[in-house]
Image (tube, helix red, strand yellow):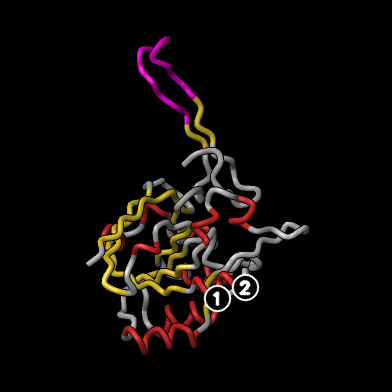
Amino acid sequence: MHPGIPQWPGDPPVRLDAHSRIESEGYFLRRITLGEHSGTHMNAPASFYPDGITIDQYEPESFIAQAVLLDMRRPSGEDPDYLLAVEEVESWERTYGAIAEGSVVLLHTGYQRYWNSPEKFLNPDPSGTAHFPGFGTEAARFLVEGRGTAGIGIDTHGVDGGMDTAFAVNRLVLAEPRLVLENLANLDQLPPRGTTLIIAPLPLVGGSGAPVSVLAIVP
């Protein structure tokens, strides 16, 4: 987390300002300013629903979950507006087995390689519209309603494709208190299935979301 990370347009910039210094106060302390959806983060239902729960209201047990990984680097590399389709989920299941209820589905697009180049990571066109891959709405619906998944995650700035400014996938998944993880790192180190996630958000009271540390335990 530092001031140069990719930021969603209009979000508060990340600032790390020295508040106390060893030379003057005898100890070092920084003041942190950042948006709740900065860096690797989790969205809460309150992001989109006035009566939705906030990040501090999730049950602690929901932060430990099994995960499956869908490696979609090839189509994501060919089309920056790529969206995961139901047929691709079904094809993955024919190879690796049905996605178990309560799993978190992670979408590996390969966009982590652009993390240190914010312009490439968000890939805006001249009008400012972002172009990066995401979950298709029907695929998200299939995972939530057809497979009973506990949530979804991705290595881009949003589970919605960059062009979707209505955040349809976020709204669909967060209609219930599920998990939405964005800006994930190191998905290339995970197997298709068998991973256990331990998710540790900042428990911000009333938070629409929070920066989060996600630990993956692999078999």
* Residue at 45% over, 53% down: 41
Tell me: residue 216, above or below residue 4: below
Quadrant (top left/top right/bottom left/bottom right) for the C terminus: bottom left
Circle 1 is placed at which residue position?
A: 75
Give the Cα separation between the discs numbered 1 and 2.
6 Å
Q: Are marks 1 and 2 in contact (CB under 8 Å)?
A: yes
Q: Position of residue 56 (x, y in %)?
A: 37, 52
Q: Amino acid at mark 1?
A: Pro
Amino acid at pointer 2: Asp
Q: Quick one: 56 or 111, which is closer to the camera?
A: 111
Describe the element under mark 2 as helix, strand or loop. loop
Residue 166 place in picture, x, y as percent: 63, 67
Left or right of 163: which side holds 98?
A: left
| Most foreground residue, 191 or 25 | 191
Query: Which residue lies most toward the right here?
Result: 126
Above or below 146: residue 197: above
Q: Which residue is mark 2?
A: 79
Image height of 4 relative to 94, above or below: above
| Element on which disc 1 rests | helix
In the figure, is residue 199 to the left or right of 23?
left
Between 149 and 45, the residue placed more toward the observer is 149
Choose top left, top right, bottom left or bottom right for residue 24.
Answer: top left
Q: Which residues are magenta?
A: 18-31
> In the figure, 165 relative to 119: above or below?
below
- Which residue is located at x 40 percent, y 67 percent? 178
User: Which x, y percent locates residue 119?
Assistant: 64, 52
Q: Residue furthest top?
A: 24
